[in-house]
């Protein structure tokens, strides 16, 4: 259990998808104008990342790798298969959410389809492969990465709502300022690097 | 419908290079830059810009993928059903990216290792999808190809500018890792400006901030600031 918590904390804070690796930047900058929409997108990302990561792990391990059921190395098909899984999962999640909770569907609105081309989702799956996580670890990594994205987008949306009342030079207003704030947030998150999640998870010092 | 368009295309020359075509290449370099104006394709780009050489490789990969995915999408545009166009586009992009990945892996393994997942992330680079949706689905193959190349160049220009600033100020070198590595400023006699023996530059030290990923954000923020100061029609009114 401890190692899962370790990976969750690492993915959410120390190796934050947005602030340390710059993944998911497009939607992060485009949808962070108000906290409400940022909240919706953040939830959707946690959801999709938490679902696609284990599915892609199963596909990678049992279908694509050399020890899988086909017995040949199919890893060159990885990109196409992963992106197809992500696109179809997003479609599926969209239909389920629409049936089960119309209120949540209305709140998420256009953001669900947008998630297909969110680099954080595919990036998460590719990191999972290159770091050779097992099933439990990839679930923890997916949820942690989604939570990290959620935190980052809520934080910048709140800052951007406030900064509208500040006296920013006209040429820097909006986009330019968003970049600089993200840079500062990245440096702030770097101070979490000294934390050792393994020590926290084991309850020791 | 499909037959009419093919007949029309036959009358005009397939490859021409007039004013419209030049505009397609030149526009994305400044007025319609994919990174600083359209805000697309930042995702997979910024982490590779700490050195110039990976930035150049990344730019070439993106130009290739963008140009040819636009070309193929445009050729197929009248046969793609509207409902599944996203999947079709993603499959085209993913195949091209696989070609790039395998080529890079066999040609230059160290740089492939260095770029790691970011080559794969060209698939979800919003710029590629964005150009396919906005341009290639509605235009003829040759123009779509040029539009793809132009946007790739606009993207590469920003990437290489950021990479140059970060490498010179952060590491004191240029093109490190490539055959034409230049050592500009540093604490040994290998460098052009030797900070140990040259009294004029004894105060100089590399700026470690530039090595951090956050520096890329600052530099792009400042590039946007400079560009919008000159090009006031781009200023965000909200």
Image (spheres, coloured by chain):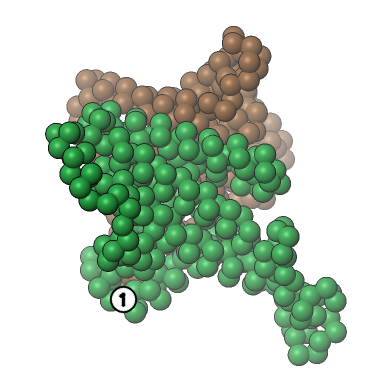
| Residue under label 1 | B231
Q: Which chain is brown?
A: A
Which residue is the extreme one toward the top?
A: A69
**Mark 1 — on which chain does it sit?**
B
Along the viewing direction, whichever of B183 and A108 lies nearer the viewer: B183
Q: Is residue A205 above or below residue A133?
A: below
Residue sitting at x 40%, y 76%: B226
Along the viewing direction, whichever of B196 and A16 lies nearer the viewer: B196
Which residue is the extreme one toward the bottom?
A: B200
Along the viewing direction, whichever of A162 and B59 lies nearer the viewer: B59
Residue B237 drawn at (x, y percent): 23, 68
Residue B174 drawn at (x, y percent): 67, 68
Q: Colour of chain B?
A: green
Residue B58 drawn at (x, y percent): 55, 52
Residue A125 drawn at (x, y percent): 52, 32
Q: Is residue B113 above or below residue A202?
A: below
- The image quarter containing residue B99 is top right
* Residue A73 in sight here: yes
Residue sitting at x 25%, y 73%: B233
Residue sitting at x 66%, y 14%: A67
* Residue B151 in sight here: no
Residue sitting at x 56%, y 15%: A63
Q: Is residue B213 above or below residue A94?
A: below
Left or right: B18, with B49 as reference point: left
């Amino acid at each position: 259990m401890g190692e899962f918590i370790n990976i969750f904390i690492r993915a959410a804070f120390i190796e934050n998808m947005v602030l340390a690796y710059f993944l998911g930047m497009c939607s992060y900058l485009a949808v962070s104008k108000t906290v409400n929409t940022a909240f919706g997108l953040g939830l959707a990302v946690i959801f999709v990342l938490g679902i696609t990561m284990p599915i892609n792990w199963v596909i990678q391990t049992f279908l694509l790798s050399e020890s899988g059921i086909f017995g040949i190395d199919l890893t060159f098909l990885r990109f196409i298969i992963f992106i197809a899984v992500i696109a179809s999962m997003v479609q599926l999640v969209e239909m389920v959410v629409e049936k089960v909770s119309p209120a949540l569907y209305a709140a998420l609105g256009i953001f669900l389809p947008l998630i297909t081309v969110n680099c954080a989702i595919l990036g998460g799956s590719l990191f999972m492969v290159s770091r050779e996580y097992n099933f439990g670890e990839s679930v923890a990594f997916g949820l942690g990465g989604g939570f990290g994205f959620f935190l980052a987008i809520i934080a910048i949306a709140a800052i951007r709502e406030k900064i509208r009342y500040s006296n920013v030079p006209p040429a820097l207003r909006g986009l330019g300022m968003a970049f600089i704030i993200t840079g500062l947030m990245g440096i702030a998150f770097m101070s979490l690097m000294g934390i050792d999640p393994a020590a926290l998870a084991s309850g020791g010092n | 419908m499909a037959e009419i368009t093919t007949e029309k295309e036959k009358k005009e020359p397939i490859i021409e290079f007039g004013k419209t075509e030049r505009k397609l290449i030149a526009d994305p370099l400044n007025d319609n830059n994919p990174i600083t104006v359209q805000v697309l394709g930042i995702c997979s780009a910024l982490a590779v810009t700490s050195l110039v050489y990976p930035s150049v490789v990344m730019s070439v990969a993106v130009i290739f993928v963008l140009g040819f995915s636009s070309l193929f999408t445009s050729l197929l545009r009248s046969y793609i059903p509207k409902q599944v166009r996203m999947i079709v586009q993603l499959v085209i992009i993913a195949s091209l990216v696989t070609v790039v990945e395998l080529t890079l892996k066999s040609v230059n393994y160290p740089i492939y290792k260095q770029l790691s997942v970011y080559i794969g992330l060209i698939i979800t680079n919003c710029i590629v999808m964005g150009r396919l949706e906005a341009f290639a689905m509605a235009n003829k193959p040759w123009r779509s190809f040029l539009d793809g190349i132009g946007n790739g160049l606009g993207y590469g220009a920003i990437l290489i500018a950021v990479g140059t600033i970060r490498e010179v100020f952060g590491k004191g070198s240029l093109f490190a890792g490539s055959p034409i590595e230049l050592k500009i400023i540093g604490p040994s006699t290998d460098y052009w400006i030797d900070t140990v023996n040259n009294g004029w530059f004894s105060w100089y030290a590399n700026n470690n901030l530039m090595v951090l990923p956050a520096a890329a954000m600052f530099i792009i923020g400042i590039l946007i600031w400079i560009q919008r100061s000159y090009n006031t029609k781009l200023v965000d009114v909200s």
